[in-house]
Image (cartoon, grey):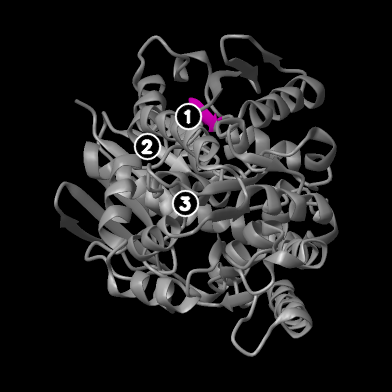
Amino acid sequence: MSRLVVVSNRVSPARGGKTGAEGGLAVAVQAALSESGGLWFGWNGKVSPNGAAPPVVESRDNITYATIDLTQRDYDEYYNGYANRCLWPVFHYRLDLAEFGRREMVGYLRTNDMFSTKLLSLLEPDDLVWVHDYHLIPLAQQLRHADCRQRMGFFLHIPWPAVEFLVALPNHQNLIKALCAYDVIGFQTETDLHNFSEYITREVGGQSEQNGIISAFGRKLIARAYPIGIDTENIANFARKAEYSSLTARLRDSIAGRQLIIGVDRLDYTKGLNRRFHALEHLLRSYPENRGRVVMLQITPPSRTEVPTYDEIRRELEETASHVNGSYAEFDWMPIRYLNQSFSRKTLAGFFRISRVGLVTPLRDGMNLVAKEYIAAQDPEDPGVLVLSRFAGAARELGEALIVNPFDVEAMGESLQQALNMPLDERRRRWLASYEWLRQNDVTAWRKAFQADLADPAAPSLNFGRAS
């Protein structure tokens, strides 16, 4: 049986602990590898002068972790530069925030080449290589140049933009040619897949067939949507236990019987956090009966603190939260609790369970696993209501949520009012439909679907052409 080799920008530490990388990608990869076993290769989060050092390899349970350092130059040009100041905003439809620099682009390619060189010594002939996210788009092409014949797949965790946005990227055709060195390319939604297929046909004269076969740059490959799932039953178990934890008890006691609205998001301009605060303001202004009876807890760990845009977002959120609190707070109640810190997944599961509303309103998101974890954490006898942006990939699966346009602040406020006053029977019906979907389409189903296409000997392979 072939070994699964997962490659991602960041790797969670073998011995656990907080890494700052416990986002959707890290959680999903950890869950997938825990079941299948294999090798997880990537950056350890450290910046050091010794970029030439070989990978540090250690094993825990059935996973082997192989990690490398980045140099300061790699970090500045590849990670903070091209990946997060160029690709991230372009793929999230924010051309106004994208910074196009040749030095950063060259650093991105150089660091991908370094990843491939250090991964090479760890690969075995029958490995299935599964590469994750926008940081590592060129990796397969670099490995093909080193004559790697293993089957390689790529999964994009963020949105794939419409053609009109992608072509604003100065080197877009070279980047997509590199992407087509993979044998299987996975997207979160059918919309992302459609955007990719349209680029292939419109911009490079390739072909896109209904069975997912893409012909481009002299190669054939598979491109399909594989919506990422969560470890549904484990999250439900976390929540049942965490409901009685000391931290959940502290939160429950502090809200003193009030209804809790919860949001959990990295600090990022794609999350729509400022509009979310204004939606609560509309709720309190238009439905004054909620004053003193509703609390919003917004948990927002800092992210990419070296990027100036993120400092601006933080200041803006602090100002808006202060404005809303200053306008509506009373001596024994404050409507917004805004925390710039992280909590473990188990703790968050307990917080989700006692919340009447889960508020997930990104302006653009590949999937958003917080939405799914909120549903999984609910008490079946008295579940809360998910208010979800139509621009999150999860909205394609969780249609029983209250789907909102995050650009329409007043409509979001109206949806909050609907969620807070939804009858128990309706809450149960909506929750059950969503939970059953998440249970059947969990992280294991996601991994198996992708891995089956990657391992299929009848699928397109290198026999259809070499990546140049």
* Residue 160 quadrant: top right
Q: Residues within 10 Å of mark 3 (few under 14, many from 20)?
A: some
The residue at which mark 2 appears reads as: 443
- Could you tell me residue 23's position as x and y percent? 46, 57
Q: Label 3, secondary structure: give it.
A: helix
Question: Residue at left 41%, top 27%?
Answer: 450
Q: Is 213 rendered above or below residue 407?
A: above
Residue 199 can be seen, yes or no: yes
The residue at which mark 3 appears reads as: 24
Q: CA distance from mark 2 to mark 1?
A: 18 Å
Q: CA distance from mark 1 to mark 3?
A: 23 Å
400 to the left or right of 31? right
Residue 362 can be seen, yes or no: no
- Could you tell me residue 105's position as x and y percent? 68, 57
Question: Residue at left 38%, top 34%?
Answer: 442
Q: Is 165 rendered above or below residue 258?
A: above
Question: Residue at left 43%, top 60%?
Answer: 354
- Could you tell me residue 241's position as x and y percent? 25, 58
Q: Nearer the viewer, residue 42 or 356?
A: 356
Furthest toward the left, the residue is 61
Q: Quadrant of the N terminus?
A: top left
Residue type highlighted by circle 3: Gly
Question: Residue at left 80%, top 49%?
Answer: 411
The residue at which mark 1 appears reads as: 433
Q: CA distance from mark 2 to mark 3?
A: 11 Å
Q: Are marks 2 and 3 in contact (CB under 8 Å)?
A: no
Residue stretch in magenta? 181-186
